[in-house]
Image (spheres, rainbow, N blue to C red):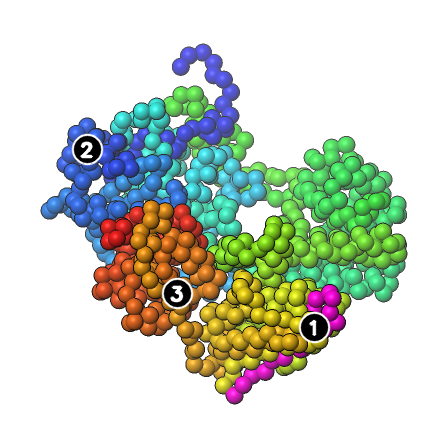
């Protein structure tokens, strides 16, 4: 290098392609294999592991390098991969005869299969890897987050054996802090140190989200190139998901400056974002076994799951408490409107909800101040600034002077949370926080983190990692996300108070809108586990709708009914929920002020969540049909008598009686809604359903077994099997024509969806919801193929698979779990169909089953 250098900035590091370094660490080898299993690239150290030179391996079938058994195991693992960001592991595999066994990592990269291998280490059956449940129990018994972090660091160190394990948490700016540490004696402590965001570049953070585990076994190891370096399109190999990916020279220098000989990191991903890392340092080379690393990776994921639950529980507890405070505030002001003119009272009333050091109130041009805050002139100027922002939403800053440099505010005031409580004119409640003078201990000077060094025009890490202290001025304690949500609740509450005091009709309508915003903000949308159910509803509604408008209305009503039921059962953490509340919610949603047309009788009972959702769909369809054609229709003055009671065995018996409505007749064709009414409770719950079409109106009787009702359990009652017979010739467009197919699925709507797809492919389908029903059908019929849902509620379909395998009947597992099928030891090579059922998915799986050979 010559002359002067251009200024170095941190974007140099952000531009480094760390996922395309073109080499691997030397403790293993890498093979890139095409879709037809030809070796396209290999690491230069291949001969050390497989006895074949890298150049000789290129262009050869992979079967010529490894045993057929090993290739079979790799193929089986590939069937469980879903997406490009998943790595499967195989332990203790013999790649070449009479040689050491290997641990493998397999993933997909574009159209290629990436195989990475390393020699097995001695299997010590570490106690730590065998006691994950006890490790989680120790985490669960910690009382505070600080104790939770300390225990996590201690457990991670026990699993990995590294000299130092840190729990490293990111803040909103991307900087990190060591919040917990477990280290061997005599090596000092990094606890409490902060590290600037530049220490982990942007592309490294992205990789931490995709690839949750990273091992650097020896900082002095020489990287092994992957050849050829570029493919026919001139592209290097993407090593984002690689276990062996080599290390950036910049990062190697960074670690050496810290005296670190090996490092390991485990991503902590909470609610889809990179919350932090387990950062592990060893002061010499260290390579834990592949099995130990997999256990540590699992521990990291379970730790993150526990952390997410804790954070949500703490936020929920805080917001629940704050809502109670807001309710008391509303009640107090409603009784004494003059309290709004008393800022001292407001700061006392809100102190437990959102801690603050001062408050300012601006209503209709009048202002009031209490505690630490700006003077009246500065506060009026601040309100003018807020009005110019024109957001109508809460607004928080923790650097007031920096945000509004032209505002003359006392240096002691550094933070602000503005709560608009009207829209025109703008009124505000503003909370103030004083400057938080604190010392931040940085691991090196954050303002001068880099300089030119041996890596040329790139960054050289800091030379010193001694704590460097910085006095942070002009900042307050930031307002948290939970505090902002509480402020939104208070905003809606105070808007209601102000509008009530003004007594204007237009502003009253605004009150209703704001209340609706609050309700919408509080809705619980935890419905990811019913995606397959929603897919089935969409398809079945489309099949029975006569037009687009009809389809949209039916679909919207059914999904809203499910949403109402889900909201009720999640309100108490998925506990049993009230049948009466369900019926009242459906009645109010459908009839509004005419809800009295449904006359209810019966002592309230609680239904288990699964039964509650099923009942919601059934009664939604009953009310929909009655409003269209029966006693609840607009042309009728009829009523519905809806009663329920428990019988001697504890079963819940429900009766629906339509009175004084138009005559009804049984339809010649039963649509999706009628099918839900007739089949859901028998199929999903093992209960009974009877529907009668009478001259005076429709009657229906249902029986829900006692096990779904809070109270003594009763014997199960399984629904009868659904069968089909007949064989036909095989047309080209119906690959299953003439074949008998057994479908085992415990959810009625999903089963109906699967039946439709199989029948469109030409199959004769028999459906069973349980192992018992499936075995009864198999005893009386023979089948050409079976499609088995792995998880059948309280049981699995593995017993059915054993029976089919003994009879020589091919079968396919269906599952919504990525790796759940791997637990079926004797059937781990069976094809797996990922839910939800789709025509493309079922057609693709048929090619692997190779049924057509039997035609």
Above-or-below relation of 380 to 181 = above
User: Which of the numbered marks, if any, corresponds to residue 431?
Assistant: none
Rendered location of residue 597, percent (x, y): 72, 73
Q: Earlier in the sequence, mark 1 or mark 3?
A: 1
Q: How far apart are marks 3 and 2 (CA)?
A: 47 Å
- The image quadrant where one finds the N terminus is top left
Rendered location of residue 43, percent (x, y): 25, 32
User: Which of the numbered marks, if any, corresponds to residue 767?
Assistant: 3
Q: Residue at x 34, y 64 (%)?
A: 725
Whether residue 282 sits left or right of residue 695 in the image: it is: left
Q: Does the magenta stretch include residue 88?
A: no
Q: Residue at x 38, y 52 (%)?
A: 761
Q: Distance between the residues labelled 1 and 2?
A: 78 Å
Which residue ends up furthest to the left in the rendered image?
A: 98
Whether residue 634 sits left or right of residue 137 in the image: it is: right
Whether residue 172 sits left or right of residue 637 in the image: it is: left
Rendered location of residue 420, percent (x, y): 77, 47
Q: How far apart are marks 1 and 3 (CA)?
A: 37 Å
Q: Which of marks 3 and 2 is in front?
A: 3
Residue identifier under label 2? 60
Q: Give the range drawn in magenta.
A: 632-648
* Location of residue 287 (image quadrant): top left
Residue identifier under label 1? 661
Q: Which of marks 1 and 2 is in front?
A: 1
Q: Looking at the image, can residue 431 be seen?
A: yes
SS at badge 1: loop
**Crowd band around label 3 with a 10 angstrom C-alpha radius: few (<14), some (14–19), many (20+):** many
Above-or-below relation of 374 to 20 = below
SS at badge 2: loop
């Amino acid at each position: 290098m010559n002359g002067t250098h251009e200024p170095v900035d941190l974007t140099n590091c952000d531009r480094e392609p760390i996922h395309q370094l073109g080499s691997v660490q030397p403790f293993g080898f890498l093979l890139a294999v095409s879709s037809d299993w030809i070796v396209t690239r290999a690491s230069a150290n291949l001969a050390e592991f497989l006895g074949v030179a890298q150049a000789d391996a290129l262009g050869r079938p992979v079967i010529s390098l490894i045993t057929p058994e090993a290739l079979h195991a790799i193929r089986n693992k590939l069937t469980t991969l879903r997406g490009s960001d998943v790595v499967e592991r195989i332990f203790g595999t013999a790649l070449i005869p009479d040689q050491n066994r290997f641990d493998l990592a397999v993933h997909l990269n574009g159209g290629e299969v990436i195989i990475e291998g390393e020699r097995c280490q001695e299997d010590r059956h570490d106690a730590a890897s065998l006691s994950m449940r006890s490790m989680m129990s120790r985490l669960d018994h910690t009382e505070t987050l600080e104790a939770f972090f300390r225990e996590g660091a201690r457990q991670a160190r026990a699993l990995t054996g590294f000299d130092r394990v840190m729990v490293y948490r990111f803040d909103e700016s991307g900087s990190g802090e060591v919040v917990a540490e477990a280290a061997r004696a005599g090596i000092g402590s990094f606890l409490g140190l902060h590290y600037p965001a530049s220490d982990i570049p942007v592309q490294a953070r992205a990789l931490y989200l995709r690839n949750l585990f990273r091992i650097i076994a020896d900082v002095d190891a020489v990287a092994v190139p992957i050849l050829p370096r570029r493919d026919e399109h001139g592209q290097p190999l993407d090593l984002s998901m690689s276990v062996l990916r080599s290390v950036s020279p910049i990062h190697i220098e960074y670690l050496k400056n810290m005296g670190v000989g090996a490092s390991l990191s485990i991503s902590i991903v909470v609610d889809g974002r990179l919350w932090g890392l387990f950062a592990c340092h060893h002061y010499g080379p260290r390579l834990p076994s592949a099995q130990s690393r997999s256990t540590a990776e699992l521990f990291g994921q379970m730790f993150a799951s526990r952390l997410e639950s804790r954070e949500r529980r703490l936020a929920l507890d805080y917001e629940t408490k704050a809502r109670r405070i807001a309710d008391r505030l509303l009640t107090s002001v409603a009784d004494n409107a003059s309290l709004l003119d008393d800022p001292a009272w407001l700061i006392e009333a809100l102190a437990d909800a959102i801690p603050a050091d001062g408050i300012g109130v601006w209503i209709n041009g009048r202002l009031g101040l209490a505690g630490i805050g700006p003077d009246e002139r500065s506060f009026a100027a601040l309100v003018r600034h807020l009005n110019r922002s024109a957001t109508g939403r809460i607004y928080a800053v923790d650097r007031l002077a920096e945000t509004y440099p032209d505002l003359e505010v006392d240096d002691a005031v550094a933070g602000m949370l503005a709560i608009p409580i009207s829209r025109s004119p703008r009124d505000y409640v503003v909370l103030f926080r004083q400057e938080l003078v604190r010392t931040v201990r940085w691991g090196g000077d954050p303002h001068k983190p880099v300089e030119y060094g041996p890596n040329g025009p790139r960054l050289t890490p800091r030379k010193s990692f001694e704590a460097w202290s910085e006095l942070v001025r002009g900042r307050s304690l930031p307002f948290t996300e939970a505090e902002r949500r509480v402020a939104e609740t208070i905003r809606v509450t105070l808007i209601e108070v102000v509008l009530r005091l003004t007594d204007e009709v237009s502003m009253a309508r605004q009150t209703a809108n704001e209340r609706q915003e609050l309700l919408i903000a509080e809705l619980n949308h935890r419905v990811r586990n019913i995606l397959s159910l929603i897919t089935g509803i969409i398809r079945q509604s489309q099949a029975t709708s006569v037009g687009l408008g009809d389809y949209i209305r039916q679909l919207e009503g059914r999904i809203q009914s499910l949403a109402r039921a889900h909201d009720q059962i999640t309100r108490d953490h998925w506990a049993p929920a009230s049948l009466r509340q369900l019926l009242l919610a459906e009645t109010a949603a459908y009839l509004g002020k005419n809800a009295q047309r449904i006359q209810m009788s019966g002592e309230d009972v609680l239904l288990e969540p699964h039964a509650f959702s099923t009942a919601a769909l059934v009664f939604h369809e009953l009310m929909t049909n009655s409003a269209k054609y029966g006693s609840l229709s607009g042309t009728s003055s009829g009523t519905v008598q809806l009663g329920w009671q428990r019988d001697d065995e504890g079963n819940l018996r429900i009766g629906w009686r339509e009175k004084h409505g138009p005559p009804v007749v049984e339809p010649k064709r039963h649509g999706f809604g009628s099918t839900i009414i007739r089949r859901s409770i028998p199929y999903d719950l093992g209960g009974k359903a009877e529907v009668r079409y009478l001259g005076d109106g429709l009657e229906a009787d249902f029986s829900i077994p006692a096990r779904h009702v809070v109270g003594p359990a009763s014997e199960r009652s399984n629904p009868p099997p659904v069968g089909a017979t007949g064989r036909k010739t095989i047309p080209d467009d119906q690959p299953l024509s003439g074949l008998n197919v057994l479908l085992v699925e415990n959810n009625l709507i999903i089963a109906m969806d699967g039946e439709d797809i199989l029948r469109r492919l030409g199959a004769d389908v028999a459906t069973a919801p349980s192992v018992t029903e499936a075995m009864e059908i198999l005893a009386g019929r023979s089948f050409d193929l079976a499609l088995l849902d792995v998880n059948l509620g309280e049981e699995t379909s593995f017993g059915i698979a054993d029976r089919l395998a003994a009879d020589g009947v091919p079968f396919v597992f269906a599952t919504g779990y990525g790796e759940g099928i791997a637990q079926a030891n004797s059937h781990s090579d069976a094809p797996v169909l990922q839910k939800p059922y789709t025509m493309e998915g079922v057609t693709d799986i048929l090619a692997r089953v190779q049924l057509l050979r039997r035609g």
